[in-house]
Amino acid sequence: MGRASRRTRSVLHRNRPGPPVDVGERRDRDRACIAPAVSTRETPRKKPWLRAGRTGRGVHDLERRATFGELYGVGVDDYVDPRVQCDASAVHIRGYYFPWGTKRIPYGAIKGVRSVDITTLTGRARIWGTANPGYWANFDPQRPRKKVALIVDLGKAVKPFLTPDDPDAAEKVIRERSQLGPGTEPRRSGPLI
């Protein structure tokens, strides 16, 4: 056999003390030390909601996708979607502040919540921000596909305008934890946003 190139030698010596070994032999040895996992995905992803361990030799273990609840530590009775989280102590609105800041609203600060139908002029076309100084819509690129929004009254001049994935479930959790009672008013058209 001929002499190995500089690149081949560096690959063979990487993360392994001692003499170089055949690449195929190394691959088989590393696969044998990988622990079983939930999924069969072998390549690591660079996402915060994925968890991956490492073996002592620098080879990624098989990984599994953590559930949203596992990642953010929420319970069974909480409401969670990528933009709105209702946990035991507060409502967290992701993408509320520039650029991507989260607004935390304690349940004690909520004076009321109402559900509104949204159209193109009443918030459906607004991905972030507002044209109406009385409301503020958090960043939600999925808002044009949604039909219902929640307006949270904090007793202040600006009211958060939310579009959760499941507005009925989110409204129920917010009303229950804010001790507002069940919502009896019918759903109306939303304000101009």
Image (spheres, rainbow, N blue to C red):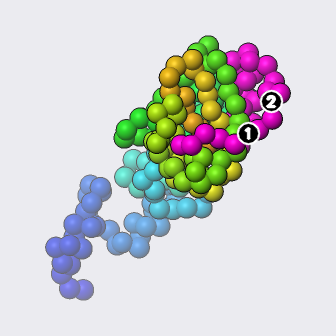
Callout 2 touching callout 1 (CB < 8 Å): yes
Q: Amino acid at mark 2?
A: Glu
Q: Position of residue 10 (x, y in %)?
A: 22, 66
User: Does residue 187 show up magenta in the picture?
Assistant: yes
Q: Position of residue 54 (x, y in %)?
A: 43, 48
Q: Secondary structure at mark 2?
A: loop
Q: Which residues are magenta?
A: 166-193
- In the figure, is residue 10 to the left or right of 44? left
Q: Position of residue 58 (x, y in %)?
A: 37, 52
Which numbered dot is residue 185?
A: 2
In the image, residue 193 sits, relative to residue 11, either above or below, namely above
Instruction: Evaluate whether residue 35 shows in this view.
Output: no
Residue at image x 30%, y 56%?
16
| Res 170 → quadrant | top right
Residue lying furthest top: 108
Residue under label 1: 188
